[in-house]
Image (cartoon, rainbow, N blue to C red):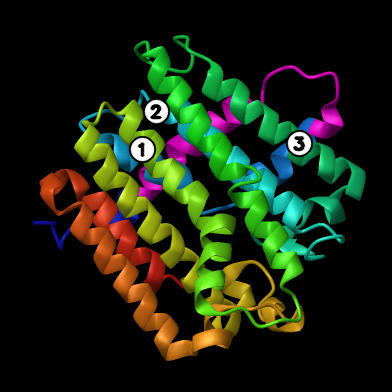
Amino acid sequence: MNNAMFDLKSYLFAKQQKINKTLDKILTQESNSKRIVSAMRHSLMASGKRLRPVLCIAAAEAAGGTEENVLYPACALEMIHTYSLIHDDLPAMDNDELRRGLPTCHVAFDEATAILAGDALLTLSFEILASNNKRHFKKEINESKRLDVIKSVAIASGFRGMIAGQMMDIESQGSKLDSNKLEILHFSKTGALIEASVYSGAVLGGGSRTQIEQLKSYGRNIGLAFQVADDILDVEGDPKVMGKAARKDADLDKSTYPSVIGIEKSREFAEKLVNNALKNIDSFGNRSDPLAAIARYIIERDK
């Protein structure tokens, strides 16, 4: 049974500190362009929840692994997420001016630099995922496991995952999607990379086949729950707290859970998803306390 007294705030702070330190270390690598590194750093090192890398680490720990052996792959996942935010904020996409409480990358620099910064973060992430040396891992990772993770992350972030979701999001503006199509859109756009983050931690953490499947199912449920909660926050959230504009979905005439099924049913659906996720990790005992607490946090957060 999961420990209701688990201190999620302290856990997140400790993991975020370690992740931020590692991300900063990665960005100290030499480059022929100081400007591109500055743009990458502007977006990557802005204050963020670091949810995907934290989930990767927590899944590895639940599977019996350690933080040290998944820290660099976890940071690679944050780079992919940040790249997607940079491109999502561009004038050709959502045209946002604020992200994580700071000017978006194209506002702070320019559109061309923002595009290249996103590209650079994406390619660097796969360089890290493909590496297998003592700088990135405390012990050598089985090659088949690394390839499995690389494939999973590539699918989640590619044209069958995150990019497909973004394209569907653009195509659906001005039209009303039914709940089934909206679920596909939301899972592709947001949930797929969250699921892949949990899956990566489970695989690299040495989980059994059964454990990996249980953790993957957990990731799928909270991935969708996260986007449902985001939809609700876009309606009810405070931009000063969230660090980004609110009510953008309505302005762009996007289909969201509140617009399709209403606020209360959206909350009920998010709750159902979290409960499903918790059932998937019940057999892990106290090792899954961080994952259980994160699942609750996802739908109770204010940013």
Q: Residue at image x 55%, y 75%?
A: 231
Q: Position of residue 150 (x, y in %)?
A: 51, 28
> Residue flagged by tag 1: what amino acid is it?
Ile
Q: Residue at image x 76%, y 81%?
A: 174
- Which SS class for mark 3? helix
Q: Residue at image x 35%, y 82%?
A: 268
> Residue flagged by tag 2: what amino acid is it?
Val
- Which SS class for mark 2? loop
Please name the residue that numbered disc 2 is placed on.
Answer: 70
* Horizontal side of residue 106 vs 65, given as left or right: right
* Horizontal side of residue 166 vs 55, given as left or right: right
Q: In the rendered structure, does residue 160 fall within the stretch colored magenta?
A: no
CB-based contact (under 8 Å), mark 1 and mark 2? yes
Residue 1 picture quarter: bottom left
Counting residues from the start of the chain, the first of labels 2 and 3 encountered is 2
Please name the residue that numbered disc 1 is placed on.
Answer: 57
Q: Is residue 68 above or below residue 50?
A: above
Magenta stretch in the rendered image: 12-36
User: CA gap, disc 1 to disc 2?
Assistant: 6 Å
- Front position among marks 2 and 3: 3
Q: Position of residue 266 (x, y in %)?
A: 44, 82
Q: Is residue 31 above or below residue 84?
A: above
Please name the residue that numbered disc 3 is placed on.
Answer: 119
* Horizontal side of residue 5 vs 114, given as left or right: left
- Which SS class for mark 1? helix
Q: In the rendered structure, does residue 22 fall within the stretch colored magenta?
A: yes
